[in-house]
Image (spheres, helix red, strand yellow):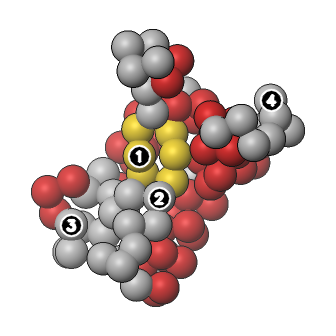
């Protein structure tokens, strides 16, 4: 399972806040580039709680919702990919 590229995901956790997380900041433009180079099917959003409080989490979700991608891809990133990986749901194509 670990060596299967189909099980390799990039976690979008704390990548939208340059001030707090400068070392791994990506921002919207680089995340869109990442999606273009790989696929929204390979990305999973994470809260990074308790390091990020509710305001930072809401801000990150807003950034994902503002990405220039299909709503279906936003749904995948915000939970669909994780559900599918964990075999809890197969609703996202």
Q: Dot 1, crowdedness within 10 Å: few (<14), some or many (≥20)?
A: some
45 up-or-down from 42: above or below: below
Is disc 2 placed on a helix, strand or loop? Answer: loop
In space, the residues marked 3 and 1 are separated at their CA atoms by 14 Å
Could you say which disc has been placed on residue 93 in the image? Answer: 4
* Label 1 or label 4, whichever comes before in sequence order: 1
Is disc 4 placed on a helix, strand or loop? Answer: loop
* Label 4 or label 3, whichever comes before in sequence order: 3
Could you say which disc has been placed on residue 21 in the image? Answer: 3
- Residues tagged 1 and 4 counted as in contact (Cβ below 8 A): no
In space, the residues marked 1 and 4 are separated at their CA atoms by 20 Å
Q: Is residue 34 left or right of residue 17?
A: right
- Residue 27 makes an appearance in the image: yes
In space, the residues marked 4 and 3 are separated at their CA atoms by 32 Å
Q: Position of residue 61 (x, y in %)?
A: 56, 67
Q: Which residue is mark 1?
A: 11
Is disc 3 placed on a helix, strand or loop? Answer: loop
Q: Position of residue 22 (x, y in %)?
A: 16, 63
Q: Position of residue 13 (x, y in %)?
A: 38, 58
Work out which residue is located at the far right of the displayed protein and give it.
91
């Amino acid at each position: 399972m670990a060596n299967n590229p189909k099980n390799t995901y990039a976690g979008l956790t704390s990548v939208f806040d340059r001030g707090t997380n400068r070392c791994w900041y990506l921002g919207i433009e680089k995340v869109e580039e990442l999606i273009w180079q790989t696929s929204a099917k390979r990305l999973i959003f994470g809260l990074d709680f308790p390091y990020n409080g509710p305001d930072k989490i809401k801000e990150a979700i807003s950034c994902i919702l503002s990405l220039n991608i299909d709503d279906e891809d936003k749904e995948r990133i915000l939970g669909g990919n994780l559900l599918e990986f964990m075999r809890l749901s197969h609703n996202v194509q």
